[in-house]
Amino acid sequence: MSVATDTKPGDTSSDEVDSKWLNAHYDPVASLYTFTTCMALSDLNGDGENKLIIADLGTGSYDMKLKVYKGTSLMSENAIIDLPTGVSTFFMDTNEPRTPAIAVASGPYIYVYKNLRPYFKFTLPPLEVNEVEEQLWNQTREDKIDVRVLREMLDSLRRENTDSSLTVRSLRFLMLDPDQMEAFADLHKHSPMKKQTVITCMDTLKKSMSDDDAISCLVIGTESKDIYILDPEAFTVLAKMTLPSVPVFLSVSGLYDVEFRIVVSGRNGHIYTLKRGSKTAKSCVELGSQPVGLQRVGKNIVVGCMDQTLQCFTTKGKRLWTVYLPSGITSMGLMDHKQRGFKAVLVGLNSCEVHVYRDKYLVNVIKSQDAVTGMQFGRFGREDGALVMTTKGGGLIVKILRRNAVFEERDSSGGPPVAQNQKLNVPKKTKLFVDQTMRERENGTTMHRTFQHDLYRMRLNTARAFVTALDNSLNPISMNPTEPLKLSAQIQGIGPTFKLTVSLQNTSMNTPSLSLIISFQYDDKLYALQKNLIHVPMLIPGLNYNFETLVECLNDKGISDTIKVFVLRQHRAVPIITAVINMPVSESVIVV
Amino acid sequence: MRQSSLCIFYNITMNYRFFPLQSKEEKKADEALLSLPTKIPEPTLKPKTKKAPELPIFERRNWLIHLHYVRKEFNTCKSLIKEQLEETQGMCEYAVYVQGLIKRMEGRIQESLELFQTCSLLNSQSTDNLKQVARSLFLLGRHKAAIDVYNEAAKLSQRDWEVSHNMGICYMYLKMYDKAKESLKHAIQCNRHDLSFIMLGKIFLMEGDLEMAIDVYKRAVEFNPENPELLSTLGLLYLQIGQTQKAFEHLGNALTYDPSNVKAILAAGCMMQQHGDFEVALTKYRIAAAAVPESPPLWNNIGMCFFGKKKYVAAISCLKRANYLAPFDWKILYNLGLVHLTMQQYASAFHFLSAAINLKPKMGQLFMLLAVALTHLEDPDNARQAYEQAVSLEQSDPSVHLNFAIYLYNIGDRKAASHHFSQFEQKLQAQRKDNVNVEIDTE
């Protein structure tokens, strides 16, 4: 093991970081609620200037909008009816000028916009409805069966039917109160039965040519664990594939007509691969933690996981490397700078940083003002190397890669950690310590003997005191097994009158204590007690009994003394237990 | 703005060839629906239109819940789940599922168990639900119940790594090691996860089978050569069986992949110290000191590094810090005693050594050091007693006899002295035979 002599301990100092990126725009109050999948950069008007398209989730329940930014200003805003799941831009025809269409996935629909105008709405093919269920509703429509019968039948159907669930209509119907059922059935029974699903992710796949402006198909993942590939011109389903789990992230490569590969991460933490012609997915990787982002770099799959790791796999599923990240991942993006042939993975972290990984090497760290939730790298405006980021607080950040920025091949986090160059925090010793050491060296034997001598004396004194306490019953817990009692006393007040509370407990299992007396010993020049003697009633085991008396301090000179509390058995002089109370100094009486 | 744009949507699509035909009435209804500000269309239409409102499906926000969950934005996630469950009256399976996961992460395991049980009531065919029920049971310490549920899950999906692995761990806690090994091996066959290897290795260690444990870890390292945890554990195991070369190799590898792996740093540093490489060990300890500033073994080792460098004051400072952090660790007290003996502070040394003996009464070397301290404190009777105790407890270390011999010689008991000296020589010979490098200063 060689000692690392490298003096540069991965100090990506702030000015070095910033030297790679120019801050183009920062709007902390853009109020954007969006993800990487809901952002796209594209030349919508064919004027050579790329726009930023963001599907904004609004408040998460209303105010959803499709926003288009030209430069740093908002160019247009279209309302979206339901939560947008993903946004893609794609060419759906060969018309000139070449302007791409925008596809917004939302619920079971894909809304297609051309020239920022609504153009077409595609609805996912409905799922198969359970036959029995359909018959039941048909019979209801023909008034052959009562709503109560319908309810019972549906309920049993739901219980026994295990592989596919019922339609929303039936499920809603089952939730209703009996008096609402009739109206609900009347309202719904005439419309045809349909069972819909929801789009969970969307991507594009070039159809037959790999040009930048070639026609692309849409690839859609649904809640029903299916993947659909849609024809861009006719909007028919070209291919349908089934997954074992609900797809979350998609990564598509290749050409539909030649050969393509879709890498999908499922909600169960597995990654699946799909090829042209396959109907079902092949499980490729079983991750130990849920993926937060998935990107393809060349032939490899890079996955960011919930357990703060970035892992890389081949498409066959072999693990190539794992990087442990300093903080949780919030988003992932791909940085593909075609002009320079530079491909890297962007990882947004909770610690308000974006790490740029080329292979497993961290080549750059971008500090942001807030945790990044969505990002897109690409051409924005007329600038090729732009990085658009949205933050957790709803901000929008645009950074531009400097033209002279060079990413080093070498891992900038390499070398020994920073801590190695920090001095050890060894506790300092004073001169006194050294003096004491010298003294001990000179007089060690004497010190040792004195110590041993005193130790023995202390032990002796302790033993003596203990014996005396036992003899005089001065201890608050009775040592006599026939009188198992526990005593504690407390004093309240600031004087001159105090309240003295004696609490007494019988600690035996089942023998009650009888005929006990509490008495006090005190200096009668200093204190006067309201009750000198307290007769104790029978003590039931386990319960705590409190006895109170008032103590008046007769002296105003600020003197205090102790009061002893004895618990005695009648007709016996030696107390069973004793408590000693150190009285506080009394406040003097203020005469007004 | 919004209303007009949505209306245009339909006007344009009318001309499109794939637009489904709609009656005028229906179209009107649709438009009315779409222009409603809320996303859940209310049944506002009169029954005579006979157009039922569209019912939002239960799973419509699952993807959003999932996205927030994986980002660990649990507060957002919880409010989403609450909305979704209100909307569906608790029938949305995935929302309940994620709620269970979050509750479990917050440490409310019993609640999570109840939620997962609700999930498996909603969908009894899902292995995921059963696995989570079992996992919560496992975390509650109800291992037997967990195994039962895992068996159920195994019926639904064969060759599932998670099921086999977790079943193995349950068996391990029930101390049924054979079954545990079987399950874990099965899990490894399904998917070679590091975790299964680590647990299997642990079981072998619990049974005291070092060889097999090393074998398991070796296979794990083959599959995943860059996991610092595996590498450092394997290194420590090699250290235990005395293969220092291999141990150092693996610890070094672990440090290459994770230069701040405390476990590897401590082990490697300890080996460096044994070779007298105190400077290098200290530089490595600096990293560990930043990561775990309150680790008693670390400060103990740092202290002994300074001791080796003859910086006694620093050594005492570090050892005292270690002792402060772990007052009942006899090794630290032993070292403190040793350093104080070297500093000729015999009275202090006596205290530390007697404290160490109180914690570890069966250690001959401690008594020997105590005897040395007592000799210097001019207490020959107790010193002799301590030496005798040391000789009776310590069988292998020849230095006990040597020290005793010197002591006896000094007090004039030549006969006993020569007896112990010959014993010392015998033991030394025996050790040399065992090929242990022994260096002694001849007086």
Image (cartoon, rainbow, N blue to C red):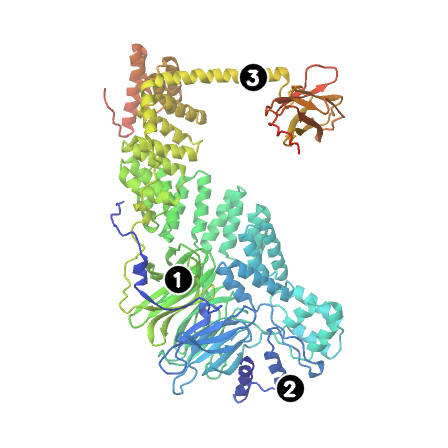
- Quick one: SS at disc 2? helix
Q: Earlier in the sequence, mark 3 or mark 1?
A: 1
- Subunit of label 3: A
Q: Tell me if B93 is positioned left or right of A333 in this view.
A: right
Report the chain holding disc 1: A
Is residue B278 shown above or below B33? above
Please tell me the numbered disc located at residue B25: 2
**Residue A394 versus residue A81: which sits nearer the camera?**
A394
Choose top left, top right, bottom left or bottom right for residue B38: bottom right
The dot on residue A553 is none
Q: Is residue B59 left or right of residue B328?
A: right
> Percent x, y for residue A463?
54, 16
Neighbor class of circle 1 (other Cα within 10 Å; few <14, some 14-19, many 20+) is some
Q: Amino acid at mark 2?
A: Glu
Report crowding for label 3: few under 14, some 14 to 19, many 20 or more residues within 10 A (C-alpha).
Answer: few
Residue A364 against residue A227 in the figure, above or below: above
- Residue to which mark 3 is pinned: A465
Of the residues shown, which amino acid type is indicated by label 1? Ser
Is the residue at mark 2 from the same chain as the one at mark 1?
no
| Residue B138 showing in the rendered view | yes
Which type of secondary structure does the marked residue at label 3 adopt?
helix
Identify the residue position indicated by label 1 in the image: A368
Q: Residue at x 30, y 42 (%)?
A: B283
Q: Residues within 10 Å of mark 2 (few under 14, many from 20)?
A: few
Q: Position of residue B295 (x, y in %)?
A: 40, 39
